[in-house]
Amino acid sequence: MSKEYSLTPARVPRVETPFRRIVTELPVPESIPILYSLYRYEPIAMRGQPPILWDHAEGFQVYDRYGNKWIDWSSGVLITNAGHGRDEIVRAIVEQASSKLLTNYCFPSEIRARLVEKLASLMPEPLKKVFLLTTGSETVECAVKLCRTHGMKAGGRGKNVIISYEKAFHGRTLGAQQVGGIPALKEWIGNLDAGFVQIPFPDGFRTPDKSFDGFVRALREHDVEPSMVAGVILETYQGGSASFAPPEYMRAVRKWCTGHKALLVCDEVQAGFGRTGTMWGFEHYGIVPDLVCLGKGISSSLPLSAVTGRPDIMDLHPSGSMTSTHTGNPICCAAALASIDLILRENLAENARKVGDVLHHRLHTLAARTPQIGYVDGKGLVAGVACVIPGTKEPDGDLAWEVVRRSVEKGVLMFSPVGFGGATVKISPPLVITEAAIHDSLNALEEAFAEALVAHSAVA
């Protein structure tokens, strides 16, 4: 069961750096009535994040209305790749809203045409068709539909198995959770579809065998014949740990899928739009998938997502049979075009690579002197720091939670620990963050780790 933060204000040390400021008790006493209102009227499932009442956010910083500011290591939830509250995105949203075209379903609009053309131009051949949706879960549902449609067309109704990976997260809808590899998230389903099969993800830590032989062996263990597989889908990096598969493994999967007429799907909902130091995360593997799921960082603000893919796959369903109510909402399209322009014009993928190198170097240095850190993974401006019981690979969720809690009190804002039994400290700041701000926030993280370890050992 996940932890909950206390709503009792507590004194915390004052913080004042060029990028962080904490000058009140936390949570702020004046914010408590609003927090209680959320607790009263929203489901318990909405709790779990630090009780910081956001007022506004700019660039890589989040502010409350009480004088505090944080370096944001969450990007919302990996949304604000181009930065929070960018003037260019605000203007685009306002201009589109002022035009009085707020929605138009699947009826044509110029701005939707501009966005799908822009996305297609950024994708490698042959991924030149684009279907706009609203959430990442929708894109995964769409990818499953296309995989199974393609599979049954290629090999009959028995070619319908979707291979995905243990510990993966692909969304919260029925199909997306069955694709996912976290058993606790799908206990509510009851009657799981046997056509969804999860195999170990070759991260080198929880799954030591990183070879493609592990893929073949796992299919045998699940009694899955290659002729049954309609598609293989994976997060380009696993969201809960920021772990990538070896490039040679992914190249072998690509070859296997082609040889067995199965589609390869990369879920880039977290990895896309410069997050990993390249425009698309799959570029690190030297492959081109058949379908790509996009979302989150697509607009740095409003809800929008997309599936891009080969025309022969994207055109499998006839006119009017694969639509969405808010597909290509004009205001969301305006935000996306402005965000993509910022990412390209300011070369934010390269900034993610350069600043990310600084981030990862310091994290690995911290891990080398901290036995309670089992591994550090990620690329660019995404990282996962896994807390473990020393000398084992057992996750230590209590330590991770305490590190995050103390970091927030020091002015570095993160979401609650994720993945690996809720024991991974996830780091994912906006791509506009500077090297100086990364160093400042890492100073806070190192202090939080040191203090948490002392408190942890005292309890133990």
Image (tube, rainbow, N blue to C red):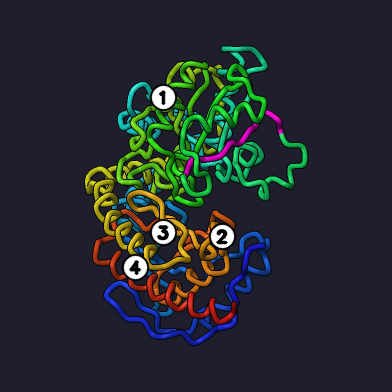
- Asked if labels 3 and 4 touch by Cβ distance under 8 angstroms, the answer is no
* Mark in front: 2 vs 1: 2
Q: Earlier in the sequence, mark 2 or mark 4?
A: 2
Label 4 amino acid? Leu
Q: Earlier in the sequence, mark 4 or mark 1?
A: 1
* Mark 2 to mark 4 CA distance (whole Å): 22 Å
Q: Position of residue 345 (x, y in %)?
A: 22, 45
Q: Which residues are magenta?
A: 193-203
Label located before the other in sequence (2 or 3): 2
Q: Residue at position x 48%, y 84% from top?
A: 25
Disc 3 is placed on an element classified as strand
Q: CA distance from mark 2 to mark 1?
A: 42 Å
Position in image of residue 124 (x %, y %): 32, 27
Amino acid type of the residue that numbered disc 1 sits on in the rendered structure:
Lys
Q: Which residue is mark 3?
A: 427
Residue found at x 22% / y 48%: 346
**In the rendered image, the vertical position of residue 275 relative to residue 59, given as above or below:** above
Residue at figure coordinates x 52%, y 42% from the top left: 135
> Residues under labels 1 and 3: Cα distance?
32 Å
Residue designated by label 4: 442
The quarter of the rendered structure image containing the N terminus is bottom right
Q: Which residue is mark 2?
A: 395
Tag 1 residue = 129
Residue 101 visible: no
Please report the residue visible at 42 percent of the width from the left and 85 percent of the height from the top.
13
